[in-house]
Amino acid sequence: MTTDLTRLVETTRPRFRTATEFVEATLRAAILDGVLAAGAPLRQEELAAAFGVSRMPVREALRQLEATALVEFHPHRGAVVAEISAEDAADISAIRAAIEPQALRLSLPHLEKADFDRAAELIAEMDAEKDFGRMGELNRRLHMTLYARAGRPRLLTLVEQHLAAADRYLRFQFTALGYHPQSQDEHYALLGACRAGELEQACQLLTEHVLYAETRLTAFLRERETTAQD
């Protein structure tokens, strides 16, 4: 338990109604601000003692942080602060920007009204969703709905793998930077171009959508990494 985290515990304690909210919010702030470094162990007994609570709210708080990609659980190690880096985020986005437009290019001529309607339903669900973990799943399903008729199983497997890899960064982005309405505007614009059969416009919008999200996130992560080194 670092001195900075101990100080954070004392300053945030009065603001929360439940022990779980207190632990979750304090640890989230410590992780996002770099007080707790990537890979740092999060031992339930130590945290419970530091926060002055039982292990139950600590356990629940760690599970909530896992759902937002801030904490990972490993066999024999338990909970640790997740490894989230600007370099990895940029790498994943570069791959997505290269292969997803190709999947859309192959799929779009074969998409049917039912596919577009399903994509619209998924975007609407995202508008109403408050759970960041669920948002990531809906985002993955939306993109795969638009690529589903590409007729290239290996390509689609590769796309889905990188969408899954991007999911933790998407959840981290929602947690660190908040929900950004522009992302949904981009989804609606992409679907509109797909419905209209505007292939080149749709592929361009998709590329811009992937790279814009990466730009926001990597800027935040690089600033955090620089601060942690100072």
Image: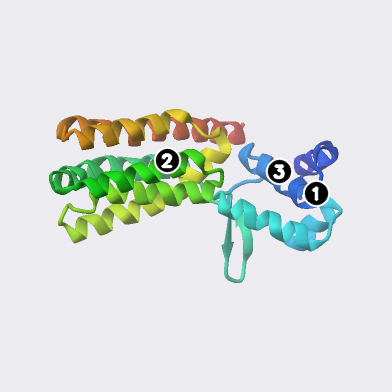
Q: Earlier in the sequence, mark 2 or mark 1?
A: 1
Q: Judge whether residue 118 can be spotted in this image.
A: yes
Amino acid at dot 3: Ala
**In this rendering, position of residue 52 left or right of residue 8:** right
Identify the element where label 3 is drawn: helix
Q: Position of residue 65 (x, y in %)?
A: 62, 51
Q: Position of residue 192 (x, y in %)?
A: 26, 32
What's the CA distance linking mark 2 and mark 3?
A: 29 Å
What's the CA distance linking mark 3 and mark 1?
A: 11 Å
What's the CA distance linking mark 2 and mark 1?
A: 32 Å
Amino acid at dot 2: Ala
- When asked about the image quadrant of residue 97, the answer is top left
Numbered disc in front, either 3 or 1: 1
Identify the element where label 2 is drawn: helix
Depth check, front residue: 50 or 197: 197
Residue ID for mark 1: 18
- When asked about the image quadrant of residue 13, the answer is top right
Amino acid at dot 1: Thr
Q: Is residue 95 above or below residue 49?
A: above
Q: Is residue 151 above or below residue 128?
A: below
Depth check, front residue: 145 or 178: 145
Residue ID for mark 2: 124
Depth check, front residue: 229 or 84: 84
Q: Quadrant of the C terminus?
A: top right
Tell me which residue sits at (78%, 62%) in the image: 55
Identify the element where label 1 is drawn: loop
Numbered disc in front, either 2 or 1: 2
Q: Position of residue 23 (x, y in %)?
A: 75, 49
Q: Which mark is residue 25?
A: 3
Tell me which residue sits at (55%, 34%) in the image: 178
